[in-house]
Amino acid sequence: MTIVIGVGNDFRRDDGAGPAVIEALRGRVRARLAVTDGEPARLIALWAGAGSAIVVDAVRAEPPDPGRVHDLCAQTAALAARSVSGHALGLGDAVALGLAVGQMPDRLRVLAIEGADFGFGRGLTPGVAAAVAAVAGRLAAELVPGGAEPAGPIVRHPHRKGNHAS
C-alpha cells in the first residue's frame, strides 16, 4: 500500500503546498491520501504499516528559491535534528521516533517544496503554486491508476491552535 501525506496549513499561505498537492491528486491516483499538520505522532500513525509513504511539505530555506523541490529519502530527512520547518518538532523527529518504535513504512520519500510566504492567509505564491502542479503531475505519473490500492477519501487531521508554518 502507498500513502501520500500532505503536511501543512492552508491558512498559512505557502505552508498549504502539501495539502494542495493532495487535493490535486484526488481521483488521479490509486493510493491513500492524507493531510496532517506534521505532528510526529500523527505522521507515524498515518505511515505505519505502509509499503511506501510519500510526504509532501513546504519548507523554509536560506536563501529561499520559492518552488524549488527537494526529493529526499528517509535517511536524508532524518538528518535534520530540528525541522527546516516552523513546527516545534519536525519530520526528522518523526523519522527518529518512527525508527525507535518500529513504526516506519518500508520506503519513505519526502518532497519538500521551498516556500516564500508563511504568513496568515490563503493562497500559494506563484512559484509554489507551479511547484505544486509539477509535484502532483510527477506523482500522478508515478502512481499509475489501476494499481491494487483503491482511491479513498482524503484523511484530514485538524490543525491545532498555534500551528506554525511547516
Image (tube, grey):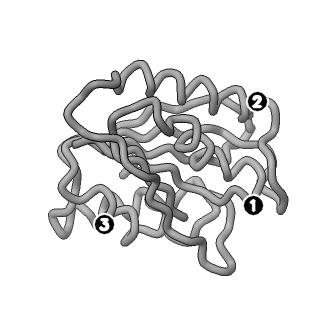
* Residue 163: image location, x then y, percent: 65, 72
- Of labels 2 and 3, earlier in sequence is 3
**Alpha-carbon distance for marks 1 and 3?**
24 Å
Pointer 1: what residue? Answer: 11
- Of labels 1 and 3, earlier in sequence is 1
For the point 77% across and 52% down, the residue is 13
Task: Tell us which disc is closer to us: 1 or 2.
Answer: 1
Asked whether 25 or 17 is in front, the reply is 25
Amino acid of disc 2: Gly
Task: Tell us which disc is closer to us: 2 or 3.
Answer: 3
Q: Indicate left or right for 165 with 105 as reference.
A: right
For the point 22% across and 55% down, the residue is 104
Give above or below for 25 relative to 155: above
Name the element at disc 1: loop
Pointer 3: what residue? Answer: 45
Q: Indicate left or right for 80 with 130 as reference.
A: left
Q: Which numbered marker is on residue 48?
A: none
**Residue 115 occupies quadrant:** top right
* Residue 29: image location, x then y, percent: 40, 31
Name the element at disc 2: helix
Amino acid of disc 1: Phe
Q: Quadrant of the C terminus?
A: bottom right
For the point 65% across and 60% down, the residue is 9
Q: Indicate left or right for 38 with 59 as reference.
A: left
Callout 1: few (<14), some (14-19), or many (20+) C-alpha neighbours within 10 Å?
some
User: Are discs 2 and 3 less than 8 Å apart at CB?
Assistant: no
Q: Residue furthest top?
A: 141
Amino acid of disc 3: Ala
Callout 3: few (<14), some (14-19), or many (20+) C-alpha neighbours within 10 Å?
few
For the point 23% across and 59% down, the residue is 48
**Alpha-carbon distance for marks 2 and 3?**
31 Å
- Of labels 1 and 2, earlier in sequence is 1
